[in-house]
Image: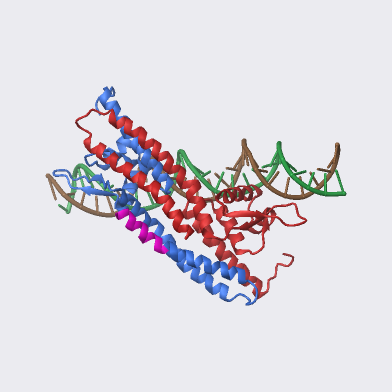
Chain colours: A blue, B red, C brown, D green
Amino acid sequence: MVSVVKNADEQAVAQTEKAVIELFVRLAQAIGMQRTVGEIYGLLYATERPLTMDELTQRLRISKGSASQGLKLLRSFGAVRSEYVEGDRRDHYMAEVEVRHLLGGFLRERMQPHLAWGATRLNEIDQLVAALPGDNHTVLKQRLVRLKRWRTRGQRLLPMILKLLRA
Amino acid sequence: MVSVVKNADEQAVAQTEKAVIELFVRLAQAIGMQRTVGEIYGLLYATERPLTMDELTQRLRISKGSASQGLKLLRSFGAVRSEYVEGDRRDHYMAEVEVRHLLGGFLRERMQPHLAWGATRLNEIDQLVAALPGDNHTVLKQRLVRLKRWRTRGQRLLPMILKLLRA
DNA sequence: CAGTTTGTTCAATATAAAATGAAAACAAAA
DNA sequence: TTTTGTTTTCATTTTATATTGAACAAACTG
């Protein structure tokens, strides 16, 4: 931007942009992602044309490192893709505006690993419990059975939610 | 515990307890709660009889403050309840072993407010967008319509999940 | 009622996480 | 191949969050 003075339209656009970014910052924080990730996605979401990393760092006043890492994460989620622009060797990034990409990526990349870890850990605990002196500890044993049921349920819930997202 | 030396059974129990606590610590962190909260719930989950705050602080080596705050949160979630023990004026806490209490409380107390905030914010953004110069910004307008649909969907998804938890 | 026990709050501290930016790695152009 | 523009990595710094513990308040006791 050359001029610092903005006319009414520009102000209105900037204000809207800011509000959209804020929305995604909050969403990011709600699911445990960095503020910069929310900012990046928010700005891309609010902007029609693809943006370069340089534009992101300048407009959001974030470092190159943060932009690079944030974009990496968002791409791994499938929430952002880069688009080829003729005659420019820089990458140009666009938001994948389908919200399901954002949430689906999050569930796949973040939740699934936790559930998998829990599954193995529960099996290990099972071994430990089996080795406990037989007659008492029945309550603990019952509780663990319960937990295992829940783990299974969680594992099953994920695909269901992913399916719902697709709908 | 009077003696530091443990027999095989005691060791086995301690080991199991530790593993269960670790499981809940991880779960806590996965949904953005403090490690101490996970520890408290984990120990209560692994223990049949109700425990006092004092026992919690000693066995988990956490401060009175952490115990108090963690219990407060867990009670607000409905994941822990205090039980009356005759002839002892201290509170005795038990885990609500139904996992749905834990997850349901979390969804109610943590997710719902976010969604509600998002709803009002989206309406505000709507006003802003309506004020934008009419002919261009159509893409942004379309995207916001999309977002609003998703917010509605999210709002509806919560009760569905809560219902699933109940099943 | 004074003394004691139990529970909470909150300012200070410790710990953990995120952001930065300089340097390295990479990739296209010359 | 060398140069140049771009992106990634990662040690350091900054910021945010969790934990502590002393001070306070509330509830019980004799």
Q: Nearer the viewer, residue A71 or A32?
A: A32
B29 vs C28, left or right, is right
Q: Is residue A158 magenta?
A: yes
In this view of the protein, which residue sits in the foreground, A100 or A61?
Answer: A100
Any part of residue B85 in sight = yes
| Residue B76 placement (x, y as % from top left) | 57, 48
Q: Looking at the image, which is closer to me, A51 or B108?
A: B108
What is the x, y in percent for residue B147?
Answer: 31, 42
Q: Is residue A88 magenta?
A: no
Residue B32 can be seen in this image: no
Q: Is residue A123 left or right of residue B63?
A: left
Please indicate whether residue B90 sits to the left or right of residue A122 in the image. Answer: right
Q: Is residue B15 above or below residue A75?
A: below
In which quarter of the view is residue B10 placed?
bottom right
Is the N terminus of chain B in the top left, top right, bottom left or bottom right quadrant?
Answer: bottom right
Image position, residue B98 (x, y; %): 54, 60
**Residue B125 location (% of width, % of height):** 34, 34
Residue B16 appears left or right of A37: right
The magenta region covers A155-167
Q: Residue at x 76, y 55 (%)?
A: B88
Q: How many marks?
A: 0
Q: Residue at x 46, y 42 (%)?
A: B113
Look at the magenta stretch and give its main secondary structure.
helix
Q: Name the residue located 41 percent from the left edge and 57 percent from the top edge.
A: A111
Residue A3 sits in which quadrant? top left
